[in-house]
Image: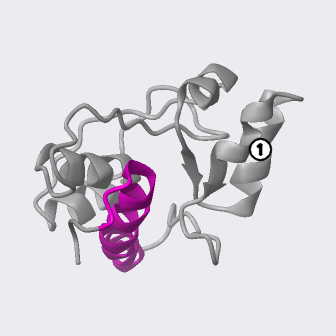
């Protein structure tokens, strides 16, 4: 869901002309190749966003090649940092919401997914603007 929403902001130039930005999603304990849940697809569709991605596990190489890694929880941050061992790239890993963990709605009702999608619609552009250095644009 986060990847699809981030792409939505980037692909529609809602954060300025940033179509060269690469967005990817991977999980610290994700299985490889699973499709989004029906609830995720419905939450995205309600916001005019299509997504056909599949899950993939996070790797140390993905982290090393990224400018920033946003995680949903402190546990995810620790797991991602653990993939790097003693590598210095661990400081680019942070929570998407710096103040609180964002719990995965897996197994919850549609309302939980809709609530998460709405939260992502507001939080993701703010965080992307910070990374992209585009403080004056988008989503305000």
> On the picture, is 63 further left or further right than 12?
right
Q: Nearer the viewer, residue 57 or 11?
A: 11
Mark 1 is surrounded, within 10 Å at the Cα level, by few (under 14), some (14 to 19) or many (20 or more) other residues, namely: some
Quadrant in which residue 64 is drawn: top right
Q: Residue furthest right?
A: 86
Which quadrant: the C terminus? Answer: bottom left
Q: Nearer the viewer, residue 103 or 22?
A: 22
Q: Position of residue 54 (x, y in %)?
A: 38, 33
Q: Nearer the viewer, residue 112 or 2?
A: 2
Q: Position of residue 119 (x, y in %)?
A: 38, 75
The residue wearing badge 1 is: 79
| Residue 120 located within the stretch drawn in magenta | yes
Count of numbered circles on the image: 1
Look at 87% across and 29% down and name the residue there: 85
On screen, residue 6 above or below 84? below
| Residue 50 located within the stretch drawn in magenta | no
On screen, residue 57 above or below 17? above
Look at 63% across and 77% down and name the residue there: 99
Look at 66% across and 47% down and name the residue there: 93
Question: What colouring method underlies this structural image?
Answer: one colour
Q: Position of residue 22 (x, y in %)?
A: 34, 32
> On the picture, is 24 further left or further right than 79?
left
On screen, residue 37 above or below 23? below
Mostly what secondary structure, the magenta segment? helix
Q: Residue furthest top?
A: 61
Highlighted magenta segment, given as a residue range: 110-135
Q: In what element is the residue under mark 1?
A: helix
């Amino acid at each position: 869901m986060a990847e699809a929403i981030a792409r939505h902001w980037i692909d529609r130039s809602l954060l300025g002309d940033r179509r060269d930005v690469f967005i990817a999603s991977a999980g610290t304990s994700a299985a490889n190749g699973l499709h989004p849940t029906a609830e995720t697809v419905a939450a995205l569709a309600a916001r005019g966003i299509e997504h056909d991605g599949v899950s993939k596990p996070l790797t140390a190489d993905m982290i090393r090649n990224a400018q920033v890694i946003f995680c949903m929880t402190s546990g995810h941050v620790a797991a991602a940092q653990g993939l790097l061992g003693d590598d210095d790239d661990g400081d680019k890993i942070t929570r998407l919401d710096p103040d609180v963990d964002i719990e995965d709605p897996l197994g919850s009702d549609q309302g939980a997914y809709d609530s998460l999608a709405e939260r992502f619609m507001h939080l993701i552009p703010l965080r992307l603007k910070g990374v992209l250095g585009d403080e004056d644009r988008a989503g305000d």
